[in-house]
């Protein structure tokens, strides 16, 4: 059991690093100063989990009780500030890493929702909020429409992953297998969407068809 908890904790740190990386890169794209890049890294790396914890009453939030999360985000922000242009050229790799981070945070959010005895809807929402909350804050600070409302199967992947989590937690799967299955399910969906440019219909497309 201890090994399982340690492994899940390791995945959590990995997801935090990946999301902090995407946040810091956005800060570099927006030409923010040194502190601004670190703030974006921290916001995306920890923001979703902090929103979730506040909503379900898991206070103080995990990022405030375990300093590792914030330290990791700050380090990532500093590194990206100095070598952001090089990392930015590897956008394809970052997209794949982000997809894996999305899956990890979805599973973590659903699991924490289950621990705090949230309803089935609440558990799914915990997964979605954990995986996308930081990105929403980042986009709002960047004066952009949140990515989850415009991107190809981003929030949709987390919703489907949450539903899979609900189904699998009623089976005899171990906690570790449940976590890994949910994480990689979201990862695969996201990668397929990226590879084949799969998107949900947009309202503008519907109106164009009506005009024709």
Image (tube, rainbow, N blue to C red):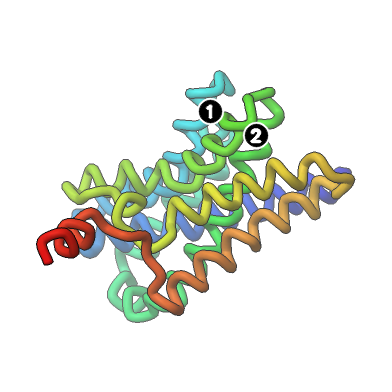
Report whether residue 82 is seen: yes
- Residue 23: x percent and y percent? 35, 55
Q: Secondary structure at mark 2?
A: helix
Query: In the image shown, does 157 or 96 lie closer to the viewer?
Result: 157
Report whether residue 75 is seen: no
Q: Find residue 114 and report its image quarter.
A: top right
- Residue 135: x percent and y percent? 36, 48
Q: For the residues marked 2 and 1, what is the alpha-carbon distance in whole angstroms? A: 9 Å
Task: Quickly name the residue at label 1.
Answer: 53
Q: Which mark is residue 118?
A: none
Estimate how packed mark 2 is, as few (under 14), some (14 to 19) or many (20 or more) residues with alpha carbons within 10 Å.
Answer: many
Instruction: Say if 188 sits above or below 132 in the image.
Output: below
Q: Find residue 89 and report its image quarter.
A: bottom left
Left/right placement of residue 118 relative to residue 145 reads right
Circles 2, 1 touching at the beta carbon (< 8 Å): yes
Q: Quadrant of the C terminus?
A: bottom left
Query: In the image shown, does 143 or 90 lie closer to the viewer?
Result: 143
């Amino acid at each position: 059991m201890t090994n399982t908890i340690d492994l899940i904790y390791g995945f959590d740190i990995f997801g935090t690093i990946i999301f902090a990386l995407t946040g810091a890169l956005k800060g570099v794209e927006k030409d923010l100063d040194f502190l601004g890049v670190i703030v974006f890294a921290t916001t995306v790396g920890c923001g979703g989990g902090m929103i979730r914890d506040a909503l379900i009453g898991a206070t103080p939030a995990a990022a405030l009780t375990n300093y590792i999360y914030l330290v990791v985000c700050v380090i990532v922000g500093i590194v990206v500030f100095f070598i952001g242009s090089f990392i930015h050229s590897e956008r394809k790799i970052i997209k794949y890493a982000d997809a894996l981070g999305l899956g990890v945070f979805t599973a973590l959010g659903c699991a924490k929702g289950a621990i705090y005895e949230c309803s089935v809807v609440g558990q799914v929402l915990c997964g979605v909020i954990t995986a996308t909350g930081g990105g929403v804050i980042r986009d709002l600070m960047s004066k952009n429409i949140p990515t989850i409302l415009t991107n190809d199967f981003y929030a949709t992947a987390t919703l489907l992953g949450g539903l899979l989590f609900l189904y699998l937690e009623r089976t005899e799967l171990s906690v570790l297998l449940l976590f890994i299955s949910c994480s990689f399910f979201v990862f695969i969906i996201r990668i397929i969407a990226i590879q084949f440019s799969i998107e949900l219909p947009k309202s503008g497309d519907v109106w164009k068809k009506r005009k024709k």
